[in-house]
């Protein structure tokens, strides 16, 4: 019985290997690698090996999701260049025939959470004006957008917020500030002095004249 189980297991493993080897590569624009550079940036590699209904590819446009910014866009494909314009990255070059492996590199800075899925909708343009839109949010869709799941090494360090200076305490409700108190005291003293002088003057005027 043990030999039978082992033989069945080995046969199943061999059959699975044959099936995986024989399976054709998915005809998608895919994000095949996300490499952390150790300086807070991550290089993303997009790739495809097909055109649009056999038409050669001349352009690839990738939309950046929230939390991802790009600095440079390059490609080892001869004659191809990349440009970054806000949240859009455009790669263009001479026609790439179908069934030709092509890769496009994007240096990015990514902020978010570990385990967060980032989706990169892409539009592939080919000769004759044909296009293939890889924009579906679901990975199981017919035309899924390239995607990746963030790891700790891919994410840029978040800046530590600086401590805000404590606000000056307001004066007690209904109280006066020191300058206000000084002004009030001065006014009070002047009024008191004026009143005393006025009283003294009145007394002198009303005092009786001594008889002779």
Image (tube, rainbow, N blue to C red):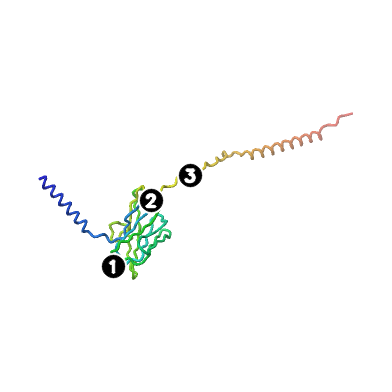
Q: Residues within 10 Å of mark 1 (few under 14, many from 20)?
A: few
Quick one: label 1 or label 3, which is nearer the N terminus? 1
What residue is at 78 percent from the left and 34 percent from the top?
200
Q: Quadrant of the C terminus?
A: top right
Camera-nearest label, 3 or 2: 2
Task: Kindly check if marks 3 and 2 are in contact, taking CB atoms under 8 A apart as contact.
Answer: no
Task: Kindly check if marks 1 and 3 are in contact, taking CB atoms under 8 A apart as contact.
Answer: no
Residue tagged 1:
54
Residue tagged 2:
37
Q: Kindly report the distance in space between the C-alpha atoms of the residues bearing marks 3 and 2.
A: 27 Å
Q: Residue furthest bottom?
A: 128
Q: Kindly report the distance in space between the C-alpha atoms of the residues bearing marks 1 and 2.
A: 36 Å
Q: Residues within 10 Å of mark 3 (few under 14, many from 20)?
A: few
- Estimate the x, y position of residue 132 in percent, counting from the top left: 32, 64
- Estimate the x, y position of residue 111 in percent, counting from the top left: 40, 50
Quick one: label 3 or label 2, which is nearer the N terminus? 2
* Depth order, front residue of 179/146: 146
Total numbered badges shown on the rendered structure: 3
Residue 14 located left or right of residue 58? left
Q: Kindly report the distance in space between the C-alpha atoms of the residues bearing marks 1 and 3.
A: 56 Å
- Estimate the x, y position of residue 87 in percent, counting from the top left: 41, 58
Numbered mark located on residue 162 in the image = 3
Q: Quadrant of the N terminus?
A: top left
What residue is at 52 percent from the left and 42 percent from the top?
165
Q: Secondary structure at mark 2?
A: loop
What residue is at 35 percent from the left and 50 percent from the top?
150
């Amino acid at each position: 019985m043990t030999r039978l189980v082992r033989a069945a297991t080995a046969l199943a493993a061999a059959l699975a290997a044959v099936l995986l080897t024989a399976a054709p590569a998915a005809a998608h624009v895919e994000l095949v690698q996300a490499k952390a550079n150790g300086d807070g940036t991550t290089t993303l590699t997009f790739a495809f090996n097909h055109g649009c209904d056999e038409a050669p590819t001349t352009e690839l446009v990738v939309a950046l999701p929230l939390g991802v910014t790009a600095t440079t866009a390059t490609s080892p494909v001869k004659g191809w260049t990349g440009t970054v314009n806000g949240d859009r990255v455009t790669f263009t070059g001479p026609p790439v025939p179908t069934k030709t492996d092509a890769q496009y590199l994007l240096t990015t800075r990514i902020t978010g959470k570990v385990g967060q899925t980032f989706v990169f909708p892409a539009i592939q343009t080919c000769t004759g004006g044909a296009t293939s839109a890889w924009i579906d949010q679901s990975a199981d869709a017919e035309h899924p957008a390239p995607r990746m799941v963030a790891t700790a090494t891919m994410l840029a360090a978040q800046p530590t917020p600086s401590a805000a200076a404590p606000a000056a305490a307001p004066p007690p409700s209904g109280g006066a500030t020191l300058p206000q108190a000084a002004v009030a005291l001065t006014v009070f003293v002047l009024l008191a002095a004026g009143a005393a002088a006025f009283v003294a003057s009145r007394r002198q005027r009303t005092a009786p004249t001594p008889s002779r």
